[in-house]
Image (cartoon, rainbow, N blue to C red):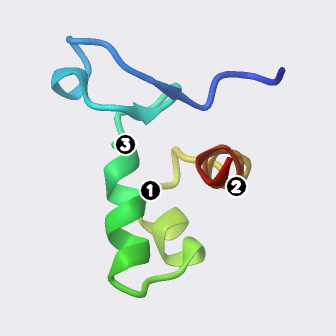
Amino acid sequence: MGPPIISRAPEVMGGAAVFYGTRVPVQTLLDYLEAGESIEDFLAGFPSVTRAQVIAFLEEAKD
């Protein structure tokens, strides 16, 4: 098992699921992808999230 991918805490973004170590909601990535944007576009807008975190999240989500 690798490092945590997402976290939830009531004091961070009202308890929304965020990428671990950031304040970036996972829902933001999903919104980007739903709108037809690329992972690169998302990463450019949210540099505190790593490509590895995005890929790990998507891999976990598909299982």
Q: Which residue is identified by label 3?
A: 24
Nearer the N terminus, badge 3 or badge 2? 3
Q: Do the residues labelled 1 and 3 touch (CB within 8 Å)?
A: yes
Q: Which residue lies furthest to the left in this view?
A: 14
In the image, what residue type sits under mark 2?
A: Ile
Q: Which residue is identified by label 2?
A: 55
Q: Which residue is drawn at 44% across and 74% down?
A: 33
In the image, what residue type sits under mark 1?
A: Phe
> What percent of the width, then of the height, locates residue 6?
51, 30
Q: Which residue is identified by label 1?
A: 46
Report the front residue among 12 and 61.
61
- The answer for how far apart the CA atoms under marks 3 and 2 are is 15 Å
Q: Which residue lies furthest to the front in this view?
A: 63
> What percent of the width, then of the height, locates residue 57?
61, 46
Q: Which residue is drawn at 31% across and 13% down?
A: 9
Q: In this view, does 11 lie above or below 21?
A: above
Nearer the N terminus, badge 1 or badge 3? 3
- The answer for how far apart the CA atoms under marks 1 and 2 are is 15 Å
In this rendering, position of residue 8 left or right of residue 4? left
- Give the number of the mark in front: 1 or 2: 2
Q: Do the residues labelled 3 and 2 touch (CB within 8 Å)?
A: no
Q: Which residue is drawn at 51% across and 44% down?
A: 48
Q: In this view, does 23 lie above or below 1?
A: below
- Give the number of the mark in front: 1 or 3: 3
Residue 32 falls in which quadrant of the image?
bottom left
